Image (tube, helix red, strand yellow):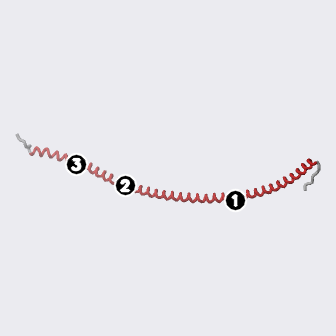
């Protein structure tokens, strides 16, 4: 019994195997590997493009945040300026209103004093007249006020 196969039988079996391997390489493996390599290149390119886009977006976001911060500062300054202008106008109006009120109060006090003096004079005259009438009735004669 022979343990070693016949070399011609081995050669006849190896040739179809090698032809099949070569055919598979040319028809399936090579195109599939080319396709996978191309896909990897596209994925790498897309990743690089995505990273570039992310970097640009972050840069723009930083710019917009900086502009927003500046705008908020300007708004705060403008608000403070307007508030101080409004306070100045308010103080001026309050001062003018107080001055006008004091003028009115002074005028009213002068009129009240005039009315008091006039009323006091009238009351005094009326009181003298009544006193004379009462004294005349009590004494039974006319009393001259003097």
Q: Which residue is mark 3?
A: 25
Instruction: Give percent across and percent down for residue 104.
Output: 73, 57
User: In which quadrant of the rendered view does residue 94 lie?
Assistant: bottom right
> In the rendered view, does 141 fall on the left or right side of 107?
right
Q: Secondary structure at mark 1?
A: helix
Marks 2/3: CA distance?
Answer: 36 Å
User: In which quadrant of the rendered view does residue 90 lie?
Assistant: bottom right
Residue at 80%, 57% in the rendered image: 114
- Could you say which disc has been placed on residue 54 in the image? none
Q: Which residue is mark 2?
A: 51
In-front residue for pair 23/89 = 89
- Compare marks 3 and 1 and give the one earlier in the sequence: 3
In-front residue for pair 100/76 = 100
Residue found farthest to the front:
139
| Quarter the N terminus occupies | top left
Residue at 86%, 51% in the rendered image: 127
- Compare marks 1 and 2 and give the one earlier in the sequence: 2
Q: Secondary structure at mark 3?
A: helix
Instruction: Give percent across and percent down for residue 65.
Output: 46, 56
Q: Nearer the viewer, mark 2 or mark 3?
A: 2
Residue found farthest to the left:
1
Q: Which residue is mark 1?
A: 99
- Compare marks 2 and 3 and give the one earlier in the sequence: 3
User: In which quadrant of the rendered view does residue 109 lie?
Assistant: bottom right
Q: Secondary structure at mark 2?
A: helix
| Quarter the C terminus occupies | bottom right
Marks 1/2: CA distance?
Answer: 71 Å
Marks 3/1: CA distance?
Answer: 106 Å
Residue at 87%, 54% in the rendered image: 125
Q: Nearer the viewer, mark 1 or mark 2?
A: 1
In-front residue for pair 91/107 = 107
């Amino acid at each position: 019994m022979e343990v070693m196969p016949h070399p011609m039988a081995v050669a006849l079996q190896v040739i179809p195997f090698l032809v099949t391997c070569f055919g598979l390489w040319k028809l399936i493996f090579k195109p599939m590997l080319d396709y996978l390599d191309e896909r990897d290149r596209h994925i790498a390119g897309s990743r690089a493009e995505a990273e570039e886009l992310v970097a640009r977006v972050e840069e723009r976001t930083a710019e917009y945040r900086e502009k927003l911060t500046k705008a908020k500062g300007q708004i705060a300054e403008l608000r403070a300026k307007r508030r101080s202008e409004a306070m100045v106008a308010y103080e001026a109006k309050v001062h003018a209103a107080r001055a006008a009120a004091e003028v009115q109060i002074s005028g009213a006090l002068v009129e009240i004093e005039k009315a008091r003096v006039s009323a006091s004079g009238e009351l005094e005259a009326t009181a003298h007249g009544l006193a004379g009438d009462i004294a005349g009735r009590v004494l039974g004669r006319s009393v001259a006020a003097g």
